[in-house]
Amino acid sequence: MQSIIDVRQVTKTYASGFSALKGIDLQIRRGEIFALLGPNGAGKTTLISIICGIVNPSSGNVLADGHDVVRDFRAARERIGLVPQELTTDAFETVWDTVSFSRALFGKAPNPAHIEKVLKDLSLWNKKDSKLMTLSGGMKRRVMIAKALSHEPPILFLDEPTAGVDVELRRDMWAMVRALRDTGVTIILTTHYIDEAEEMADRIGVINKGELILVEGKAELMEKLGRKQLILQLQAPLQAIPAALAGYPLALSDDGQQLTYTFDAQGENTGIDTLLRRLGEAGIDFKDLQTRQSSLEDIFVSLVEDRA
Amino acid sequence: MRFNWNGMGAIYRFEMARTRRTLLQSIVSPVISTTLYFVVFGAAMGSHMGGIDGVSYGAYIVPGLIMLSLLTQSISNASFGIYFPKFTGTIYEILSAPVSYLEILGGYVGAAASKSVLLGLIILVTARLFVDFDVAHPIWMVAFLILTSVTFSLFGFIIGIWADGFEKLQLVPLLVVTPLTFLGGSFYSIHILPPLWQKISLFNPVVYLISGFRWSFYGVSDVSVEISMGMTLLFLAACLVGVWWIFRTGYRLKA
């Protein structure tokens, strides 16, 4: 599939000598939702800022829909909408004026019908004449999105879009992002909320200390790196794992009431059947059992910790 | 898109709208404070003072006082215009938009200069209510008005980029520009100074601006109008070089 964003060997070293990005290669597919995960200071915002023209790369190049973001900056930036992490708004402007300003800034002729549609889609229509300083944080976040969509960009960057918003608004945002994707907009989001990426992303990139550790489809990532656990609640507590079961990756809880068996869900043989047979032979009875699959959060934490 | 007229126009209109919102501070306040000078030095004290170069004292100070407002307001408008988005963080939108540096400059400096020209004309009309004067060379007068507004708006833009706090924003206008304007012949001809101070005054760029502007009113000047115009253009060129360097390096705009 053709890339709509093509990042080639991008590095960024600040004047202080801090190396924020170390040779990033990344291709974003047209029409996908791509989540960029990483701990604080990993380089997520620097990478987005370089693509959007706010920060100069030290080396490498970026193409947005085939246009170099430095040499052909007009064509590249016309195609990009950016919702930054911080709620930065002109407090004394009205919603209508600030969204119209953004459209004109991006070189588009006035189109009140489009602005009206964007405001209605984001439930801002009844606030169109309100000054930004009178709006709640959640509403301001919507205004930032409306500004980014005002010039009808095919690429939308959302830098921590749901940071500091309540659960209901987060759900609304997720629905809005999906609706945008359905109209053909490519969405790249950074987030600290792993469940957000798990809920929405088609593909996931993990960045840490300026390096892109991994880029995978969400489903493949879960399959490849996801582990399953079988948790057995025992009838009687054990003092220790019996020697007959020493070959199994088992963990006994401190109170001896729970036995956890970790296995590869994608493996040819999970080993569950023989484990249960051995438990019976050893006279260990259980009253309940359950399985648990590792979440994206577990995968993310293990990836970042491995590289620490 | 060859030239982003819509983008430049958006910045220009945004800045002009800010003037409308802050009419008292942007227009009314400088007009009133300058008018007080006309009332005190022109109408009240001026009638008891002798003229300079054949011009009554009240009329003599009109060009200098207009220039005083023009310089301070051009710097103030342009520096605040670019500093405030940096302060609030909304500069991200300007930097990520398909606007070239020339268009950014056209929007911010164009608006600041427009406000200053408007202010200068309002003060000119207001002064006429208190002091009797004529404008001998109106085209030169308008030329100096526009050129000075643009030049000092560019200077203000540089200050706005350089400033990393509100104190620095006020530093140059208060501690450099206002003293230079007061010592640049706003209220007197530098010919009345002792010879040494006359020579020292010639290092003050504001002397040339006021002298040239006064010449356009009364045909009298401390230095020739050609030199005044030349020095104004030289300062304009210096500001353009400064702005070019800022944009080329991304100084305090882009990391």
Image (cartoon, grey):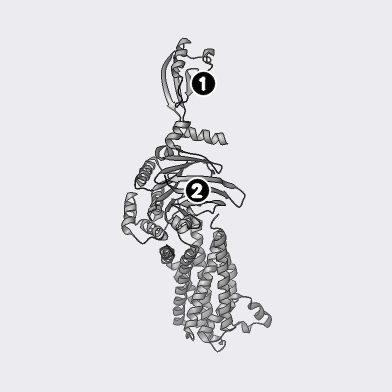
Task: Name the kind of residue labelled 1 in the image.
Answer: Pro
Give the numbered dot on residue A7. 2
Vertical position of residue A174 compared to residue B62: above or below: above
Comparing A30 with A52, the one in front is A30
In the image, B86: left or right of A15? left
Numbered mark located on residue A23 in the image:
none
Across and down, in percent, residue A281 comes to 46, 10
Q: Residue furthest front?
A: A1
Mark 1 lies on a secondary structure that is loop
B12, above or below A14, in the image:
below
* Residue A295 seen in this snapshot: no
Q: Which residue is mark 1?
A: A249
Dots 2 and 1 on the same chain: yes
The x and y percentages for residue B230 are 57, 78
Q: Quadrant of the C terminus of chain A?
A: top right
Marks 2 and 1, the one that precedes in the sequence: 2
